[in-house]
Image (tube, rainbow, N blue to C red):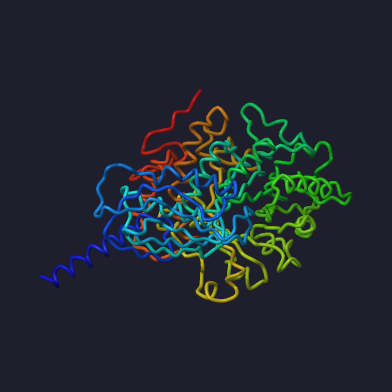
Amino acid sequence: DSQQTMLTSVVVLLATLATASADVWPMPRSVAISTPSVNVNATITASTTPSNRLSQIMARYASSFLLDTGVEADLDVGFDEIRLDVLSTDESLTQATDVSYNITAASSSSSSVVVISSATIYGAQYGLETLKQMLSRGPTLPQSIDVIDSPTYNHRGFMVDTGRRFVPLQVILDNLDAMAMTKLNVLHLHFADWCRFAIESENFPQLTAALTDEQGGFYTKDEIKQMIEYANDRGIRVVPELDLPGHSHWGLPLMDSGELEYCTGSKPYSILDDSGGHTEKTLKLLISEMIELFGAEELFHIGADETTTLDDEGCTIDNIAGIESKIFQHILDEGKTPVGWEEVFYGSGGAEGFEGEAVINAWNEGPRPSNIIADGFDALESYSPAFYLNNKPTWTQVYKDIAQESSLATTDAALQFRGGEVSMWTDNYCYSLQCGAYEGATPVGAPLYPPSQDEAFSASFQGMVWPKAAIAAGSFWNYQELSEDDLTERISEFAERLLASKLDACPNDCDCDELSRCGKPYPILE
């Protein structure tokens, strides 16, 4: 009998451990819990005077732990306080911000406190999110909890392409809420591409003057500041990307005035680094304006992908490399770190000479992070077969160990591997192929391009992004091998959690594409 009782206890404990681990996504580095369960009806406190941002974090999570529901737990004792032990309430948010946290608790007649220990307020936020997710199956927690957690990578990003189809501000804010739930910490805002320059410029107002009616959509500077504040309050940085010298039809309003020069012999047009210096002067002034707008953010991305040479007009590979190099140096002179897609080094060579100072963003099936690091740069991974959600990867494709090789995780090279990003490009929503930059078939999502279709577009965008972006978050936080069934169970539960939080996502057992969800077309307004 005693052996049977012991075996039963072990089985119950293992089941409880499995349940608690499955409740939390991304998976913590270490979870140890023990039965029985106890009730939770707890207030959040801080061991030191909270900063304004920490107070906001505590307020957002307060209702999650006030669970006087009448549900009976295994024991009468329970948790009535969640105490945040935060080493520093400094609100600065950088690439090096420590977001690690520990959760410890052991409910008894003499102790009813869950303690979340962290170096920063952002680690405290992640601890609260983990604890909240452990409550997703009911208003009880295990009597004993010991969680030790930290990310493998400091950069865990979501790239939003608003330089083609404009992404409304509310959609961005909703995505920031979902990102906070998944511990993604970088919104990469790709705001200038073939279709538009999506941010108000006081120096060059003509960039957005034509963005009206069917072409409408850009953010005011106040809206960008609102976006950044909303993101920072959730531990998320906003990295701007202004794509050049290719992907640059955004600047055509400046061509007639001679402020930007282009090679226009054939499409797509490409920015020309002219001998008179007009292009260089304009780009530097524009980038300085954007750097000032994005404030404390350390990174500035210049794209530099898929550039087109037109040698007979001067857009040679050397001309392309020249303007890229000048802009990289200008960003450094502004006290920021330049970033470019892989072509900036492996295509044009514009990043040559910036080893140790710039970040190269891998995306194609060419150079991998290990190659980039070997060549002297810090690396980001945006591997398109796995992390370009517009290409509709499967769940198992998105769940990928981005280390590439064990050496990146175990040597000093790991310090140069900053992390990964998942991306949602809006090519498939353009009114024509790349908004007229190329000849070809009309994209499938073109009916959702006009601002009049914002409601349908927003639902389409969210259905394409979530919950797949959450899977990528698991890849970037603390990748652990999972069976397909285990991954499916965890992400299905997380999708339900998103929907319960009134954040849109593709429902379980459904397919979501540009024009339909679960087989039902989005309503397109005439």
At a point 69% along the width and 53% down the height, the residue shown is: 300
The front one of 126 and 315 is 126
**Position of residue 413 measured from the top left corner of the image (x, y, whole percent):** 60, 73
Q: Is residue 377 left or right of residue 478?
A: right
Residue 228 position, x and y percent, is 63, 44
Q: Residue at x 63, y 70 (%)?
A: 373
> In the depicted view, which residue is nearer to us: 94 or 207?
94
Residue in the foreground of this view, choosing between 228 and 425: 228
Quadrant including the N terminus: bottom left
Tell me: residue 320, above or below residue 434. below
467 over 197 or under it: above or below = below
- How many numbered discs? 0
Left or right of residue 197, residue 128 in this image: left
Residue 24 visible: yes
For residue 160, side relative to residue 308 (left or right) = left
- Residue 320 in view: no
Q: Position of residue 70 (x, y in %)?
A: 27, 42
Q: Residue furthest left?
A: 1
Q: From the top left corner, tell me how far across and down residue 371 is, in percent.
A: 61, 70
Q: Residue furthest right?
A: 276
Q: Nearer the viewer, residue 484 or 152?
A: 152
Q: Quadrant of residue 155?
A: bottom right
**Residue found at the very far top of the displayed protein:** 526
